Image: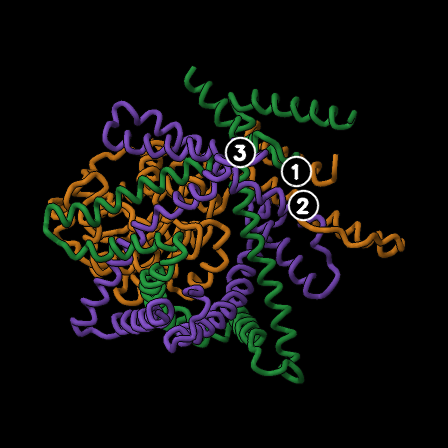
Chain colours: A orange, B purple, C green
Amino acid sequence: MEQRHIIYLLLAIMIAIPYIQPIGIPVETSKMTRDFYNKLKSLPEGSAVVLMVDVGLGSWVELGPATVAVVQHLLDLPIKLLVSGGSAELPVVWEYTLEQGNIKLGDNKYGEDYVVLGFITGGEPAAAALADNLHLTKEDQYGTPLEEIPMMKDLRTAADVKVVLSIMAGTQEEWYLRQWRAPYGTDVGIIVSAVTTALAMTYYVSGQIFGMVNSLRGGAEYELLISKPGKGVVGTDMLSLSHLLLVGLLIIGNIQLLYEKFSGTRKPEEKTGG
Amino acid sequence: MAFERNIGPKIVLSITIILMVTNYYLSPQLFQDIGKYIKEFVVVIAAVMLGLGFINALLRDIPRITKKEPGQWYFSLLTIIFIFVMLFLCAGNKYMPGTFSGMYSFLYQEVYRVLGNAIGAFAAFFVFTATFRAMRLKTLEAGAYTISHILAVLGNAPIGAVIWPGIPIIADWINEVVVSAGLRGFIITSSLGGVILVFRYVIGKSETVLGSA
Amino acid sequence: MTDLFLGLVLAGCTLAFFSLLYRENIFYRSAEHMYIGIGIGYILFQGFDRVIAYVWTPVTTRGEWIWIVPFILGLLIYTRYIKSVNWMSKWPMALIIGSGTGLAMGGLVATMIVGLIVSTITLDFRNVSNIVFLIITVTGIAYFLLTREQTGTLGYVTKLGRFCLMAAFGGSMASNVNSFCSRLGGVIETLVTYPGYYMTALAFILVLADSMILKKK
């Protein structure tokens, strides 16, 4: 067995432990998640919110808990929700969110309180086209002409939308900052994969993004804020143990370096990577 | 011939960039209408382009199957089979959901999702082995990298607060000040570079972006 | 029974992919090609569906013939596969790249240059953190200034910039680790809970058997 196989096994074990025996380490909510939650909560009744799904099911394990929590919160608020996005998997992600989150639509009526516009192809030009014309897709996901949908009568451009949210794993927040916020003044919030949190943080700190729900931990925080703990909270124990392992490996690696340096038994540089 | 192959597309590129910038900044209705049509045209073109992956797959896999390339042809056959199975199930789910929605959900919502998640999870293993082998405190910069990395890693997980209540505070400071400021400089300079690059496209020096004739 | 079958299949698919961590094998290759095939088939259908919504329906029900134009432009992209006429694909590509670039340029100056610079210089510098913020931003920008040789005072500034950027990348890498571990966690959950652990046990037995056979060889 090679050294890397031992590390793989250790990692798998540390991640598996909390799923076999949950630990229950308390989770503190971060400011960016609270800002996201508070902004949505403070929206006036009847405000239009656009939820852009820009990820596929491949990101579900990371962004699923956050997506479920935010969608549940949006459907509990007295707002009008429009669902669209640049991901071709939008229809599947939406249905999967409702199914996996066991989300009760409650008093929400399709066409009056929420509508699924369908996905739009074309990246940033498509985001810009949708900002200019919310009736871009001409019909909703299920084939109904948008002109026949009651809530779409007063919604024409991004100027009629208070907030645009993006579930993303890339740099799509820049599209919405450039094409929704700068020209129309629509506020931007994001549910983001941790891979791009660092870049998005720049815009959050500068005030251009009002809030971020960051990856699995952010999902756990949001679940706690809406008082519906779920898979996100369970997953944070796993984060704790895996991160501890990483720090442990870092420390062991540097102790090894110091030992080799002082004992004069330095080996030639090994290749990095898996 | 040179006009259709090279000069014409470059002119289209330049004019489109100028039109979209004027659409963004100028309010006269003419610019708004032109910009609107260009954006909506791009949406339609992008929809038509979604078949490119299919053509690429056929061009790559069918020769492998017909020539019975050793060690590969059966995998290529598997790809082609699943393309058509999924196509059939998608159509079935849309037009005859009662019959096909179960199979469609199984293959796409369950199998494809799980495979996609597994691909995304791979990187974790390699990151951990790379961290063990490569992250060494050899220089001052490496030290800065490693120390901020350790503190941010511990701060990102709830365990940091359990080890010492100060860790999440330091980690938040690292994220909001160090990371944000460092990447801000990076974003500003790359954006300035982007402006220059676009200027080059507008004046026709776009050899690489449209490819050679 | 259905849940058992589904769980076993899903765990099997996950383990097929993870078997690459041991060594390249037929299970991994099959899972990989299955994934590619399903993805392509799905996207192809979605493209077909979108073209019906954006072109066929407006043309046939509302007489909006203008949408034939982008449809034809989109078809021209496919000429890239025919060597004699592949130049035709450059025209729609020029339109796509031009529109994306022009739109990005429109908002880029306002949000990514002016917006970020203004928010940096209007910080409250009575707070030490904001002074540190400014120093890191300025030295980071200086590091990427390559029009002048980085010697003398500029050399010291860029050295500090490099130090600060490395600290920033260390912090941002922590976010990457967060993402990868989050994804891995959800996947491992499938393998250690019912009924996935049956497949996990089977996979371990197969790996052990294979390594013993390889050792004998």
Q: Give the number of marks.
A: 3
Image disc number at residue B68: 3
Residue B79: x and y in percent read 46, 35
Q: Position of residue A14 (x, y in %)?
A: 63, 35
* Residues at discs 3 and 1 in contact (Cβ within 8 Å): no
Callout 2 touching callout 1 (CB < 8 Å): yes
Give the label, 2 or 3, closer to the camera. 3
SS label for mark 2:
helix
Q: Quadrant of the N terminus of chain C?
A: top left
Q: Dot 1 surroundings within 10 Å: few (below 14), some, or many (20 or more)?
A: some
Work out whether residue C191 or residue B61 is closer to the camera in this orientation and state it: B61
Tell me the kind of residue under disc 3: Lys
Q: Position of residue C82 (x, y in %)?
A: 39, 53
Kind of residue at disc 2: Thr
* Residue on which the image places disc 1: A8
Dot 3 lies on which element?
loop
Secondary structure beneath label 1: helix
- Which is more N-terminal, label 3 or label 2? 3
User: Between marks 2 and 3, how big is the CA–CA gap?
Assistant: 38 Å
The three-letter code of the residue at mark 1 reads Tyr
Q: Residue at x 34, y 71 (%)?
A: B3
Q: Residue at x 75, y 51 (%)?
A: A270
At x 69%, y 54%, the residue is B135
For disc 2, the marked residue is B129
